[in-house]
Image (cartoon, coloured by chain):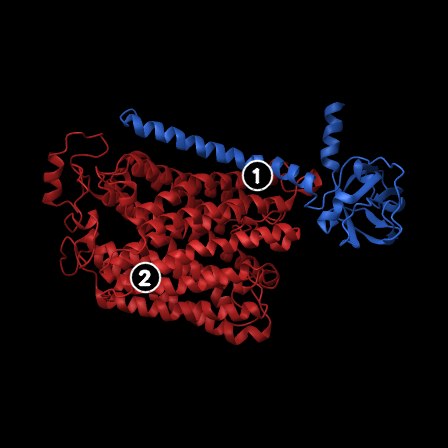
Chain colours: A blue, B red
Amino acid sequence: MSQMPQQNKKMVIKLVAIVVAMFGFGFALVPLYDVFCDLTGLNGKTSNTAAVYESIEIDESRLITVSFITRTNTGMAWQFAAETQVVKVHPGQMSQINFTAVNPTNRMIVGQAVPSVSPGPAALYLNKTECFCFEQQILQAGEHVTMPMRFYVDPQLPKDITYFTVQYTLYDVTSAEQQVALNRG
Amino acid sequence: MTTTTSEHQHDDHSHDDGHHEHHIPKGIKRWLYTTNHKDIGTLYLWFAFIMFLIGGAMAMVIRAELFQPGLQIVDPNFFNQMTTVHGLIMVFGAVMPAFTGLANWLVPMMIGAPDMALPRMNNWSFWILPFAFLILLSSLFMEGGGPAFGWTFYAPLSTTYSNDTTALFVFSVHIMGASSIMGAINVIVTIFNMRAPGMTWMKMPLFVWTWLITAFLLIAVMPVLAGAVTMVLTDKFFGTSFFDAAGGGDPVMFQHIFWFFGHPEVYIMILPAFGIISQIVPTFSRKPLFGYASMVYATTSIALLSFIVWAHHMFTTGMPVAAEMFFMLATMLISVPTGVKVFNWVATMWRGSISYEVPMLFALAFIVLFTIGGLSGLMLAIVPVDFQYHDTYFVVAHFHYVLVTGAIFSIMAAVYYWLPKWTGKMFDITLAKWHFWCSLVSVNVLFFPMHFVGLAGMPRRIPDYALQFADFNKWISLGGFAFGLSQLIFLALLIKACRKKGEPVSAQVWEGAEGLEWEIPSPAPYHTFETPPVVK
């Protein structure tokens, strides 16, 4: 490389810098994508923190159909279901849906539910004041639990959305959790 | 290739940067140690051709399985490996190295440079390539088989549902990427710093222009591909959750990152083809290229637009309508500069004194068939229509029209056009015409009916299909076998050409050919333009 003319060397350094920057950009797309989706609600992800319910006017003129779907990821042994599958709510009206989970195995399992709203843009207008999906759930062998989810639909929901679906997918996150416990112990 | 001319020219050469020996070593060492752009170009081209035959053999397995409905020859997992590795080999092993080989041979000769700017790196960028594909191909013979998740390796297919040989796939893609990036850097530095005096930007042959823009695309997006495969690797083996919803990731994000690479990648595979056609059409029309400047601007705008259309591969992932509209319209916008190009080629031929030599035949076939592929691309860009066509054989028909009758036909045109310059002998024209006509007919029997079965709903990447698709698939397979066999004619022709059989040719080779490469003797001496030519 020492024999390389000076101008070639300069140019190579610049081009390699572009390559390195673009490699970094590939990884930067991950947080950028999350920020973009948080702002726009594009991928149907809902907020991970509880909303505060302030007394807002209930929009009696509209009735929104909200349906709930539950599924467990491959390898997740819990039985997981929504007690009510479809509700009709006025925007601004508080509702509660109960979900049940049973751990039929003979070992402790830690579960994490991840919500997804379809169509995606509705995700921004689904405000949850209480949700089991905000934290991990621990069920001992054979344990049964009823988990409430309280929500209201923001009255600013676009007029063209009259129906949306909230899907909860339950993941088994036990091994990672146990490792944390071991490290702490 | 060592002629007295080259020895003589070499003695005049005083500013030796130590990148070549005074006596070219014989045998394998010549090829292993070579830093000569012509040797490396030849290596790339032969490598690409061997990969083309291997990838083609895999396509034959696919078509044999799809000859009739039901599962008869291979099991579905192996079928998936064949579709995956066929795609990977054709994209990264055949089309891209072939273009790099042409760039190695032609860019220095076209701009009046003695060699590439970074000859040692040039040697490296070629010689890591065989290892990349050795790794990839060897995974096919390992327990569980090779990659079976499609060349697009969507997560979670490549993370949760893949086998351990995925690591080999990842490393081989890393090596291919490194090779392409090094090749691209070399092309850029050569074009920027080594043009002969008087070779201004707007005098550069279009092949050089299109390759310069391609090289910038390569250094911009190959690192993103490297990032994507690295994320797949760490998700699969090291517990990260880039694409795993359980850990807070998102599988759809994989598609965004992949296609941010993937869409510019398809232009990487077609822009040099545009350059080749823009060299060949004027020669055999005996007229200068119509609209040279507009060709340069059109190529640049295609390259820039390629960065804002990636999500048209993902219309069915549930995007909001506004985003779908944006990506649909941006995609359709690309047809404007592409249309400018097709118009310019036709306008170049207009009232030209056209002769139909073999390179021109391939170039004409390119113009017609690539335009068919472009039009089906325009259909796919329409969102509601794409919802129906998504993941059907219509998509397969579309990208094979642009890649086989587009990119590969242009490479064949280029080989026929410059082969006499490389060997100093005219190739066997009878064989070449057989190759052209057999390829032309069979490629259309192969890919055209795919439009119909796709419109009727036949899904891609499935080893079996519903009975109503049986007749068309039989024709498609027969076309496929015929196209595969036609390439053996090409192989025979190339072997014959490399053994220096045939009529000697003049320096200009083709009446009407213009450019620096046609001013040096045929065969091109081992060292050319050691004293830079003056371009007026």
Q: Position of residue B144 (x, y in %)?
A: 56, 50
Q: CA distance from mark 2 to mark 1?
A: 47 Å
Neighbours of disc 2 within 10 Å: few (<14), some (14-19), many (20+): some
Q: Is residue A142 visible?
A: no
Q: Which mark's residue is nearer the viewer, 2 or 1?
A: 2
The quadrant in which the C terminus of chain B is found is top left
Front residue of this view, candidates B135 and B101: B101
Q: Please tell me in which quadrant of the rendered image residue B107 appears.
A: top left
Residue B329's place in the image compared with A113, above or below, is below
* Dot 1: element: helix
Residue B436's place in the image compared with A36, above or below, is below
Q: Position of residue A172 (x, y in %)?
A: 75, 41
Query: Disc 2 designates what residue?
Result: B347
Query: Disc 1 designates what residue?
Result: B231
Residue drawn at the location 58% of the way across and 69% of the way down? B465
Q: Amino acid at mark 2?
A: Ala
Q: Which label belongs to residue A77?
A: none
Q: Position of residue B167 (x, y in %)?
A: 53, 42
Subunit that carries the residue with mark 2: B
Residue drawn at the location 22% of the way across and 29% of the way down? B17
Q: Is residue B526 visible?
A: yes
Q: Position of residue B505 (x, y in %)?
A: 14, 57
- In this rendering, position of residue B254 left or right of residue B6: right
Neighbours of disc 1 within 10 Å: few (<14), some (14-19), many (20+): many
* Dot 2: element: helix
